[in-house]
Image (cartoon, rainbow, N blue to C red):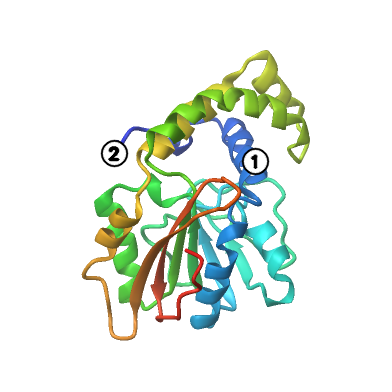
C-alpha cells in the first residue's frame, strides 16, 4: 500500500516558522519512540566503529538527543543535517547542526561519518531511495535507516485523532513560542498540516520487504545489508530498519 502523495513539510515555500513548529512537534513526539531499537542501533555502531554520525533529514534533531543520552559515554558525536536546516536550539554537547542545506541524495564529501536517517526515507521515491543507498554502498559509508511509520490502514485511521494529540501536547513542547499557540489553537494550521503529513507519511512508508528490495544488488565487498522490524511489546509503533555496512551478529530483538 505505497501511495506517493505530497507532504507540506517537503515544500520549499512552506513558511520557515510553520516548518519549525512541525519539526519541533515531531522532535517532542519521537524522542522515546526509537528507544526499543537502541540495541540494534548500538550493535550497528559498534560493528562499523562509528564514532561520528552524520544524521540526514534531521528536522529539529529527531530522536538522537534521547538516544545519545541513553547511550551515555558510548554515544557518537552527531552532526545534524537537513535540506531545510532548523535554526532553533538543538543539544550540541556531542555534535552540532550543519547550517547549510544538505540533500540526503548527494552528501558533500566534507561531511564524513556514518549516516543515519530517522523517519525520513519515506520522503524519497523508490528510485531516489535506492540511489541514496547505492551511494552509501559505493562510498563504503555505513548507513542506518529507522522508521516508526508504516503503510497500514490502522495507522492511517489512527491519524484522524492526531489533532487532539497535538492540542494536548503543545503546551509541553520546547522552546516555548507564542506563535505556536496561535497557529495551533486560534488558527489550527499546525494540527491540520500534521494530520495530512502524518497520513501521507504512513501511506508512503516502506515495509521490510520494500527495504530488502531497495537494497537488492547493492552488496559490496565487505559491505552488506540487513532489514528487519522491531516489535514493541507495550503496543507501541513497530520500527522498521535497514542497516548498511559491515555484517554483525543479530541482536535478536527485531
Q: Is mark 2 on a helix, strand or loop?
A: loop
| Quarter occupied by residue 227 | bottom left
Q: Position of residue 211 (x, y in %)?
A: 32, 58
Q: Tell which of 25 and 94 is nearer to you.
A: 25
Q: Name the residue under label 2.
A: 1
| Quarter occupied by residue 78 | bottom right
Q: Position of residue 232 (x, y in %)?
A: 55, 53
> In the rendered image of this protein, does residue 139 appear above or below residue 69?
below
Q: Which of marks 1 and 2 is nearer the N terminus?
A: 2
**Residue at position x 72%, y 23% from top?**
181
Verify CB contact (< 8 Å) between mark 1 and mark 2: no
Number of numbered discs overlaid on the protein picture:
2
Q: Tell which of 29 and 1 is nearer to you.
A: 1
* Quadrant that contains the N terminus: top left
User: Distance of mark 1 from mark 2, alpha carbons?
Assistant: 28 Å
**Residue at position x 57%, y 69% from top?**
39
Name the mark on residue 123: none
Q: What element carries label 1?
A: helix
**Residue at position x 43%, y 74% from top?**
142
In this view, the mark in front (1 or 2): 2
The answer to whether any part of residue 67 appears in the image is yes
Query: Within 10 Å of the Cα at label 2, are there few (<14), some (14-19), or many (20+) other Cα atoms?
Result: few
Q: Tell which of 195 and 39 is nearer to you.
A: 39
Q: Position of residue 189 (x, y in %)?
A: 58, 20
Q: Name the residue under label 1.
A: 24
Amino acid at each position: 500500500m505505497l501511495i506517493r502523495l505530497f507532504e507540506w513539510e517537503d515544500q520549499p515555500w512552506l513558511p520557515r516558522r510553520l516548518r519549525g513548529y512541525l519539526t519541533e512537534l515531531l522532535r517532542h513526539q519521537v524522542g522515546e519512540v526509537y528507544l526499543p531499537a537502541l540495541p540494534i542501533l548500538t550493535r550497528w555502531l559498534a560493528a562499523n566503529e562509528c564514532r561520528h554520525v552524520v544524521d540526514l533529514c534531521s528536522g529539529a534533531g529527531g530522536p538522537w538527543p534521547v538516544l545519545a543520552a541513553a547511550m551515555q559515554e558510548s554515544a557518537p558525536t552527531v552532526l545534524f543535517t537537513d535540506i531545510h536546516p532548523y535554526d532553533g536550539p538543538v543539544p550540541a554537547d556531542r555534535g552540532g547542526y550543519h547550517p547549510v542545506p544538505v540533500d540526503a541524495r548527494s552528501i558533500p564529501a566534507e561531511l564524513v561519518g556514518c549516516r543515519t536517517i530517522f523517519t525520513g526515507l519515506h520522503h524519497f521515491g523508490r528510485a531516489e531511495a535506492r540511489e541514496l543507498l547505492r551511494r552509501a554502498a559505493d562510498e563504503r559509508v555505513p548507513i542506518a535507516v529507522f522508521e516508526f511509520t508504516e503503510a497500514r490502514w490502522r495507522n492511517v485511521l489512527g491519524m484522524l485523532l492526531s489533532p487532539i494529540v497535538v492540542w494536548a501536547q503543545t503546551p509541553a513542547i520546547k522552546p516555548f513560542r507564542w506563535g505556536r499557540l496561535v497557529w495551533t489553537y486560534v488558527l489550527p494550521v499546525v494540527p491540520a498540516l500534521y494530520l495530512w503529513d502524518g497520513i501521507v507519511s504512513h501511506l508512503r512508508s516502506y515495509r521490510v520487504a520494500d527495504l530488502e528490495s531497495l537494497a537488492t544488488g547493492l552488496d559490496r565487498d565487505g559491505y552488506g545489508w540487513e532489514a528487519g522490524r522491531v516489535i514493541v511489546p507495550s503496543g507501541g509503533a513497530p520500527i522498521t530498519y535497514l542497516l548498511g555496512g559491515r555484517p554483525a551478529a543479530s541482536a535478536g530483538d527485531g
